[in-house]
Amino acid sequence: MTDIHRSVSSKRWADVVVHRGVARWVEVADDTAGDLRAQTGQVLAQVDATLAVLGSDRSRLLEVLVFLADRSDAATFDEVWDAWVPEGHPPVRALLQAGLGAGCRVELVVTAAAGD
């Protein structure tokens, strides 16, 4: 049986779960005072940091679910995303509108291949 590894800091959720070489986690901006562009930049930097801890990188992203507080922000999100995602290595992606916490403009659910 393959082990499931959880990085846990809360009774309610794990920070990262890794199973069979696939990592899953959620990112929201640490500072929600900024606009969507600022929050997206923060969230993508946090994804980079988590990938580095996992021995992985953007080219190993498998799936990203994007939740926006306001669907009309999609074009701005896409502009920042397109500059960040590696050419030739985009993950499967869905963009949805959702009721997010106070001040939160964007939330990502990330699935990536962990490092070997």
Image (tube, rainbow, N blue to C red):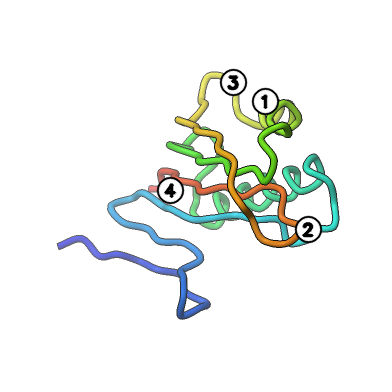
User: Could you tell me the amino acid type at mark 4?
Assistant: Gly
| Extreme residue toward the top, this view | 88
User: Could you tell me the amino acid type at mark 1?
Assistant: Asp
* Disc nearer the start of the sequence (1/4): 1
Give the residue drawn at x 67%, y 25%: 82
* Disc nearer the start of the sequence (3/1): 1
The tag on residue 44 is: none
Q: Gap between marks 2 and 1, in whole Å? A: 22 Å
The tag on residue 82 is: 1
Instruction: Say few, some or many: other residues with alpha carbon within 10 Å of mark 2 (under 14 / 14 to 19 / 20 or more).
Output: some
User: Could you tell me the amino acid type at mark 3?
Assistant: Glu
Q: Gap between marks 1 and 4, in whole Å? A: 24 Å
Q: Gap between marks 4 and 2, in whole Å? A: 30 Å
The tag on residue 87 is: 3
Residue 113 position by quadrant: top left
Q: Position of residue 74 (x, y in %)?
A: 68, 30
Give above or below for 105 relative to 37: below
